[in-house]
Image (tube, rainbow, N blue to C red):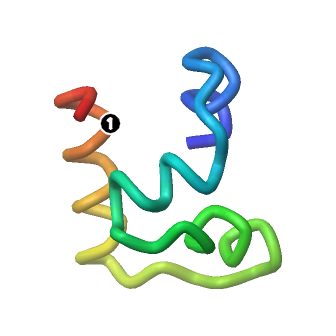
């Protein structure tokens, strides 16, 4: 995800809002939040579709 943010030049809050409906999502992950398997699958699907 960090690689995607850097390559796409997408702000972390925007990614979190679009992918999860949570603008704090990326910041929480950076602070140690562990996503559930379902959340990981949702993020991977988002990254694969580019939406």
Residue 8 placement (x, y as % from top left): 55, 18
**Secondary structure at numbered mark 1:** helix
> Image quadrant for the C terminus?
top left
Residue at horizontal 24 percent and vertical 76 percent from the top: 38
| Along the viewing direction, whichever of 27 and 42 lies nearer the viewer | 27
Where 6 falls versus 32 (above or below)?
A: above
Residue at horizontal 30 percent and vertical 47 percent from the top: 44
In this image, 9 relative to 8: left or right? Answer: right
The residue singled out by tag 1 in the image is 47
Residue 7 placement (x, y as % from top left): 62, 15
Residue at horizontal 52 percent and vertical 48 percent from the top: 14
> Image quadrant for the N terminus?
top right
**Crowding at mark 1 (Cα within 10 Å: few <14, some 14-19, many 20+):** few
Q: Quadrant of residue 31?
A: bottom right
Residue farthest top in this picture: 7
**Total labels drawn:** 1
Q: Quadrant of residue 10?
A: top right
Residue farthest right in this picture: 31
Where 7 falls versus 43 (above or below)?
A: above
| Along the viewing direction, whichever of 44 and 6 lies nearer the viewer | 6
In this image, 6 relative to 34: left or right? Answer: right
Residue at horizontal 35 percent and vertical 52 percent from the top: 18
Residue 37 placement (x, y as % from top left): 31, 77
In this image, 27 relative to 1: left or right? Answer: right
Residue 27 placement (x, y as % from top left): 72, 68
């Amino acid at each position: 995800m960090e690689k995607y943010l850097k390559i796409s030049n997408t702000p972390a809050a925007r990614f979190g809002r679009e992918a999860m409906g949570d603008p704090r999502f990326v910041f929480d992950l950076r602070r140690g939040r562990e996503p559930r398997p379902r959340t990981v699958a949702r993020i991977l699907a988002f990254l694969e579709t580019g939406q």
